[in-house]
Image (spheres, grey):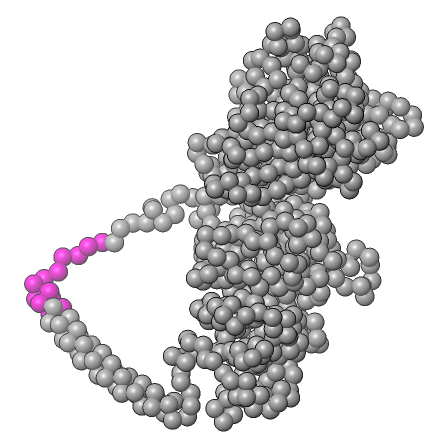
Amino acid sequence: MAFAYAAFFLLVICIYKPVSSQQNHSNLISLGSSISTNVQPTSWFYPQGSGFIVGIWLVGKPADIITWTAYRDDPPVPSNATLELTVNGKLLLRTYYANNEAGEEKLIAKIEKSASNAGMLDSGNLVLYNEHSDVIWESFNFPTDTILGGQNLYAGGELLSSASTTDFSTGRFRLKMQSDGNLVLYPIDTIDTSVDAYWNAETFGSSGAHLYLNYTSGELLILNKTSGKVRAVFYSDSEPESSSIIYRATLESDGIFKLYSHNFDRNGAYTTSLKDHAPESQCQVKTFCGLNSYCTMNDDQPDCRCLPGTVPVHPDQRYNGCKRNYTEQLCKVAEETSSYNIIDMEKMTCYDIPYFVNSTSEEDCRKSCLQDCNCAGAMYEDGDCMKMKFPVKYASRYEDDDQYSSKVFFKVGLKSVGSAMKPPVVHKTSKKTVTLIFVMSVAFITCSSIAIAASVFFISKSRVVEARMRLGSGNLGLAHELSLRAFSYRELKNATKGFREELGKGSFGAVYKGTLYKGKKVIAVKRLEKLVSEGEREFLTEMRSIGKTHHKNLVRLLGYCTEDSQRLLVYEYMSNGSLADLLFRTERIPNWSHRVKIALDIARGILYLHEECEAPIIHCDIKPQNILMDDFWNAKISDFGLAKLLVPDQTRTFTIVRGTRGYLAPEWHKNTPISVKADVYSYGVMLLEIVFCRRNIETNVSRPEEVLLSNWAYELMVARELDKLDLGEDVDLQNLEKMVMVGMWCIQDEPGIRPSMKSVVLMLEGITDVSVPPHPTSASA
């Protein structure tokens, strides 16, 4: 059997260095061995697009079958990448720049102790051993979308489908072996609830059970540690036991879980047989057709169709869902419900959780949905009206007329609105009337030109006088504000009266209140304490970069001091303190509209830092203490530019851990590149604090689940209980839910899943819709 399996799986590494004489097995890979993509056969490097992915695949004819991939959601590596089992016992993927300089390194196997050697088992399992030949890591413990014969999927483990048959990144579906013993299929961005499940093995009550694929019989079993087999999920029809048969169970990209057998001949060709699958029909897979659509079988083939009131997002991509054909804004300004209509759908049901349930008549249910801008459609069953919002996730069609007694209807925006308006009636005008209109027009234009010229003259004169007054008073006006001034240390010491009045102490040093121009201009002076070792040239370069940033939601830098070892920054004075004071230290919280404005102000400021200023800046310490309020309670970001600046055309940078506990993105603790998405994470935490007017981590709470705000907020959002919170009398519940969902998207663990700040601004402004986010699996603490 060993010979047969080895023929079907490519070995892990083509060994460049000879195996140590101390090794007893010829298939072991020694330390220092490596492989590159330009070596044939390209073991472990599988072509995808213009690059390669790292993985294990079943080799044979007619086609190879990928069974495991590493870093599946990262871009393919270039052709100069190498894979190496280093002399230090680490399995590393290395990439290189165009000039062959060493680039990024990634650990394929994250292990606490160093490996002594590695090997590919006949089962397709990559294993790392220590010096005692004990297994310290194996790929079977980290499946992607497939388990092979002899492999287990333990409680809590998941299979994640691939995006397509040619794109092996994470797709839209997941199979979870739950801790209660049940094996369940879900769409990818859902929590473990029965509403989201579309198939289960019905093996409840077997705590600690796991899934196992028998490599000899091909049975897919759920096993209990104490009592043995619980039940068989899939059966393989009777086949003679043979070393030339390989079994695999794969969650396909279309959401169907399938069991296959591959029977190889001596020439390496194989015949593939589908042994079993679940669910039975493609249309039973929830979200298979995307949002706002439903699946129906057409000649035994699944066909995706849009719900009434929606049109395809991409007409040539039938599985990407649909979008509504009218906007929520149009609904809000419409004076009559005649702009919309209600359409019944036969043989339909909907599994979405309704946002409103009321006992009423069928006709009143229709009218209620028609007049409600939030209502996408409603299901009427047993006297209950259950209204649903966009997007509709789980609309489903059934074939049995007696299967359901419910009625489902959807709101439709009439296409004739606006286009069916009658054109204005054109009346013929007499020559006398035309002449009169012409004379009046010429007179009006002449008078307007004279008035504009006079206004320009007087404005110019007044500005000259104002400029002279500013020069006399020491206020240089806008020209002064747009250029940084170099202050002497003595000037700032006098301005602050010997640094007497301390306003606060931040990450980089203390801030003092001062005045300039005989007390006419109030300033804030930050005395830097952690940059004293920086050279004057580097400091001046950084000041010039910061000086070029101008935005209404950034605290303006007026000048600086670099004298001997002194490093001081002069900012405009913010009279109303910090956002932390406003949210956490006042008895009366700001009203809802003000909190919404603050959230947007901050988002626009961060967007400017990331995408709109000359040198993109990662703030690295977004938190309420660094958001200051001006005289008119506008929010402005402070301390920007003091973290490492990005050079043009660079989007990621390595840096030491900065920031504040509770607001740090997970990548700070993983020694991975830090990007602008670290600021997005911090903003998401702060957005939830703005919404709920409490700190992210609060120990003085009545219930343990309320300690971490992000987890508590997600539970309230999913349970649709946000309206039960006392967040102010003027809270807009729809806007509240939107802001919570935006915050949850921002604090996703993977930086690539988080939105850009531009997307955040568009979502907060209501320009783009916000979908339901997945549950963040961790949070900074």
Q: Is residue 138 magenta?
A: no
Q: In the depicted view, which residue is nearer to us: 585 or 123? A: 123
| Residue placed furthest toward the right | 226
Which of 354/404 is in front? 354
Q: Position of residue 671 (x, y in %)?
A: 66, 50
What stretch of residues is rendered in magenta?
A: 425-437
The quadrant where residue 504 appears? bottom right
Where does residue 36 sit, x and y in percent of width and height? 57, 30
651 to the left or right of 673: left
Give the answer, above or below, for where 399 lies relative to 707. Answer: above
Residue 682 drawn above or below residue 221: below
Q: Quadrant of the N terminus?
A: top right
Q: Residue at x 78, y 13 (%)?
A: 217
Which residue is at 51% across, 68% downward? 538
Left-right relation of 231 to 775: right
Question: Relative to 696, is 81 above or below?
Answer: above
In the image, residue 436 lies in the stretch drawn in magenta: yes
Quadrant for residue 464, please give it.
bottom left
Residue drawn at (8%, 67%), measured in percent from left and top? Answer: 435
Q: Is residue 666 left or right of residue 652?
A: right
Question: How far across and down, in percent of the image, does residue 110 sit?
Answer: 72, 40
Q: Position of residue 230 (x, y in %)?
A: 85, 24
Asked whether the viewer can see residue 757, the reply is: yes
